[in-house]
Amino acid sequence: MRPIRRLLLPCLLICLGASAACLAAAPAAELQVRIGYLAYIPATGPLLSNVIPEPTDAGLRGAELAIADSNSTGRFLKHNYSLEVSQQHDSNALLQAATDLHQQGVRLFVVNAPAATLRQLSEQLKDSLLLNAGSADDALRSQQCLPNVLHTLPSRAMLADALAQFLTLRKWTRWLLITGPTEDDQAYASALRRAAKRFGHRIVAEKPWSFDNDQRRSAQAEMPLFTQTSEYDVVLVADERGDFGEYLPYNTWYPRPVAGTQGLTPTAWHKTVETFGAAQLQKRFEAHAGRWMNDRDFAAWMAVRSLATAVTKQRASDPMTTRHLLLNEQLPLDGFKGRKLSFRTWNGQLRQPIPLVHPRALVSTSPQDGFLHPHNEMDSLGYDRPEVSCDLAGSSN
Amino acid sequence: MRLSHLACAITLGLACHTALAATAYVSNEKDDSISVIDLDTLQVTDTLAVGMRPRGLLLSNDNRLLYICASDSDRVQVMDLATRQIIKELPSGADPEQFALHPNDRWLYISNEDDALVTVVDTQTDEVLAQIDVGVEPEGMAVSPDGKWAVNTSETTNMLHWIDTSTQQLVDNTLVDQRPRHVEFDKDGQRLWASAEIGGTVTVMDVEAREILKVLRFEIKGVHPDKVQPVGVKLTDDGKYAFVALGPANHVAVVDAKTYEVLDYLLVGRRVWHMAFTPDQKRLLTTNGVSGDVSVIDVASLKVSKSIKVGRYPWGVVVTP
């Protein structure tokens, strides 16, 4: 490729020196694929467990890497990918930024924002294709699907099912469920309840974590008494922000493991995922971002890679044909997870294996062996076709 | 076996290893070792410590030297098979995974997976002759029998990169299906077979025209299509068969190399990676990464006759006469 670079430089110099004629000539040969990256991540408020900070650029760095990866194919095909980034501190500012990008001609977007913002963006950018890399909301994948939105981040239902399958395998069927106070925590707990029902687990007790406990004690000291209930095999925790859940392991009344948002955690991606070529993606990401790749980074990476795979196939970037191609299940996507990935035709969710991890190791990957499915074993995770009212592939946008 | 080696060495002197039957060398990715298999007895006779994460293996034209991609040591190691000692290490570039030796027995074309480069090293002078930019995650590597072409695959860019060996320049690219893993020329260099792991296909190309002749697909009863992930490809010299290792499908496909019809699927160990023929091409060995063994396929009957336990995550395999 060095000869091409040598050619490019004189060409650029001519372009700089000359005029519109040259500028018009250059793009004709090259397909410009502009992808908007829209992020709004609400503040979580003060957290008890705040010693190890979360990265503030989660998602963005994955999208950036995917642009570089995609340009590696693009430079040979004369497709040029670029990322137009807008990160805002409130939802309205993000909607305005999206309008501006749309006016500049951007029709492909990766969105890292809560469900409510995503809904507004979907409404506002009707003729565009949005890939959701930020919201795990189950309603968006079951009863309230958005016609122009596909999801690369796993839903809460997928995460909960992945965990529940493993707990079935281990025969840890009696659960204590502890739920935090936020709406997200409630949603995570709902997904766990659904998974318990699907896979034959029994919730022996449910306790909300509230802040009216004895404030003279630390959370650690509170946990043994707090978890003194009917006997359970495992404690399930729904604490998405990471407020109190980190204090549960080793502090439970019975000597039992902790799983859910802390302890044994189902996630889209983790540092300890290394097989099926994942080690190379991890290395590339770490060289790019200077930190480990997390689930948001993976979802955003996968979103851009999905768009680029479709563009490479059709040699065009029209949002509706891209949507159609991504929803027809004939285009296998490479996500370094050991399976060919594709989008579910009914709700636009990317089907994918879910790693179960603890902070320093991969414990297992779901779907677990033996959980069969008539169409695809990965569809044993999350909302399956008969459970939902959506039909994305059937509805034209 | 160490004892018998010793006895052998005492009685026969240095001719010892050459007096033995055909021998297979298997790289164990997670054991940092090479398993040595005697192909008369089908027993592991020795385990040799090598660099970190050994993957690709190949032999010099005279079968005296074994080249080893020690990926995590960022080295290509050269082992003298007479003494089974590492005699030198070549400057391979970072993370070498697969490589191919030019018919001139000197130029080694190495995929540097982390750097999107192909490094060309002169194995006699240890000099780096060229570094060629290719796509992201270069992996498969092959040199045509006439020495004209070196072809590299890039797993994330999804292309075959054609390098003209006379100039060491990249001259053409062919888009194939997702995650191309391995390329193999047929004996007369007219066809090139390229596997695509995620695409689930093998593309057969006409080398002269650099055009796609056929895209092969695989379907195994009882195995989900997602698990059909072609990796290694081996072709018999008589042009009769192509064998395609199908990764986590745990099968090797047997393909009629003339009609491209899939004839059979042979059950082997778990996550089958790469393969090598015995010198008489009567048997084919496969490395099975997850089950940690080598399957032996009888080529005449197309039956799997034996599995041999080796180290952890066996990856590459070569056979000396």
Image (tube, rainbow, N blue to C red):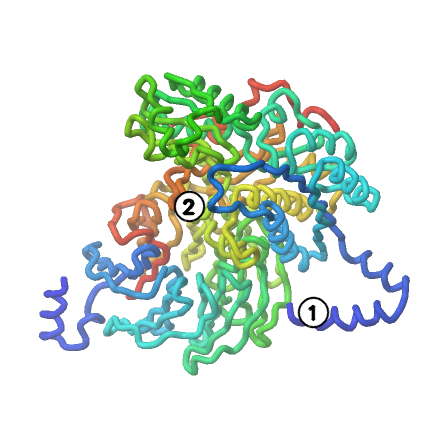
The amino acid type of the residue labelled 2 equals Gly
Mark 2–mark 1 distance (CA, rounded to whole Å): 37 Å
Question: Residue B200's spot in the image, x, y percent?
Answer: 51, 44
Camera-side residue of B67 and A245:
A245
Question: Residue A229's spot in the image, x, y percent?
Answer: 34, 19
Residue B107 in view (yes/no)? yes
The amino acid type of the residue labelled 1 equals Arg
Disc 2: which residue = B247
Does dot 2 land on a helix, a strand or a loop? Answer: loop
Left or right of A146, for residue B260: left
Camera-side residue of B251 and B293:
B293
Residue B162 lies in what quarter of the image? Answer: bottom right
Q: Residue furthest bottom?
A: B125
Where A20 sits versus A335, above or below?
below
Report the chain holding disc 2. B
Q: Which-is-in-front pick, marks 2 and 1?
A: 1
Residue A330 in view (yes/no)? no
**Residue, x 9% and y 70% (percent of image)?**
B7
Where A40 sits versus B287, above or below?
above
Camera-side residue of B200 and A187:
A187
| Residue A198, numbered label | none
Where A80 sits versus A107, above or below?
below
Left or right of B277, for residue B170: right
Q: Quadrant of the C terminus of chain A?
A: top right
Disc 1: which residue = A5
User: Around disc 2, counting alpha carbons within 10 Å, would you say few (fewer than 14), some (14 to 19), or many (20 or more)?
Assistant: many
**Residue, x 61% and y 23% (percent of image)?**
A139
